[in-house]
Image (spheres, rainbow, N blue to C red):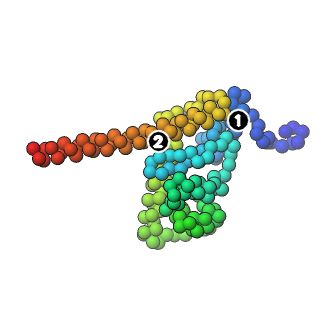
């Protein structure tokens, strides 16, 4: 850096014990730079899936078509709607979604326009509320499942830990669903017994 008079080095080591970890500039208040894996995840019916995990900083916007095609291979059809960040609303992604009958949430490109249609405003609010579920999943993963406390040293073991935590989160989601069905079934059967007794 001294000889070339630059202030950056690609792939510089920021952690001796974890040399694969890179600084990712996020620009958030309080934490401008984060260290660790960058994860792009999708959520279908409360089940979160890691779509991309990388230790390098990358732009998520270029991955939407690949993720939509993966969804199509998994379920046999494209999703009716993709609720994503503004980073995914590129011209290429919008054209792909329009071509395949997918509604991509978010404001249109260009200067913000006032939405006068109450139905469109209602859909936008619903999309925003549903999209917050995946943001919440990351928060829950960090607080309750230790996603922010990965202590493994090797790149491969760190990735396995991250995938296992997402697996546990999905299993807990399914367990909660089964428990609610059981509780509702027990309550419904007890009400029927009282009614017919």
Q: Position of residue 28 (x, y in %)?
A: 60, 46
Q: On the picture, is 13 further left or further right than 108?
A: right
Rendered residue at 72%/32% (across/down)? 19
Of the pair 135 and 48, the residue shown nearer to us: 48
Quadrant of the image occupied by residue 194: top left
Secondary structure under badge 2? helix
Rendered residue at 42%/42% (across/down)? 173
Rendered residue at 61%/36% (across/down)? 159
114 over 22 or under it: above or below: below
Q: Quadrant of the N terminus?
A: top right
Which numbered dot is residue 170? Answer: 2
Q: Specify which label sits upstream in the sequence, 2 or 1.
A: 1
Which numbered dot is residue 174? Answer: none
Q: Position of residue 41 (x, y in %)?
A: 56, 47
Q: On the picture, is 43 further left or further right than 29?
A: left
Q: Position of residue 145 (x, y in %)?
A: 49, 34
- Residue that badge 1 annotates: 20
């Amino acid at each position: 850096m001294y000889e070339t008079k630059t202030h950056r080095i690609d792939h510089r080591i920021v952690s001796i014990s974890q040399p694969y970890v890179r600084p990712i500039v996020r620009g958030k208040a309080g934490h401008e730079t984060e260290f660790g894996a960058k994860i792009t995840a999708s959520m279908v019916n409360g089940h979160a899936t890691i779509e991309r995990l990388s230790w390098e900083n990358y732009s998520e916007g270029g991955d939407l078509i690949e993720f939509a095609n993966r969804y199509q291979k998994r379920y046999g059809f494209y999703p009716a709607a993709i609720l994503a960040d503004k980073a995914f609303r590129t011209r290429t992604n919008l054209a792909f979604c329009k071509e395949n009958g997918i509604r991509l949430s978010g404001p249109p490109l260009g200067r913000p326009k006032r939405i006068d249609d109450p139905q469109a405003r209602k859909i936008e609010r619903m999309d925003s509320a549903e999209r917050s579920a995946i943001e919440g999943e990351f928060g829950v993963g960090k607080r309750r499942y230790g996603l922010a406390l990965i202590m493994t040293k090797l790149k491969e073991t760190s990735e396995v830990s991250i995938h296992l935590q997402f697996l546990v989160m999905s299993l807990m989601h399914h367990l909660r669903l089964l428990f609610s069905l059981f509780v509702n079934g027990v309550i419904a059967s007890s009400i029927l017994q009282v009614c017919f007794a």
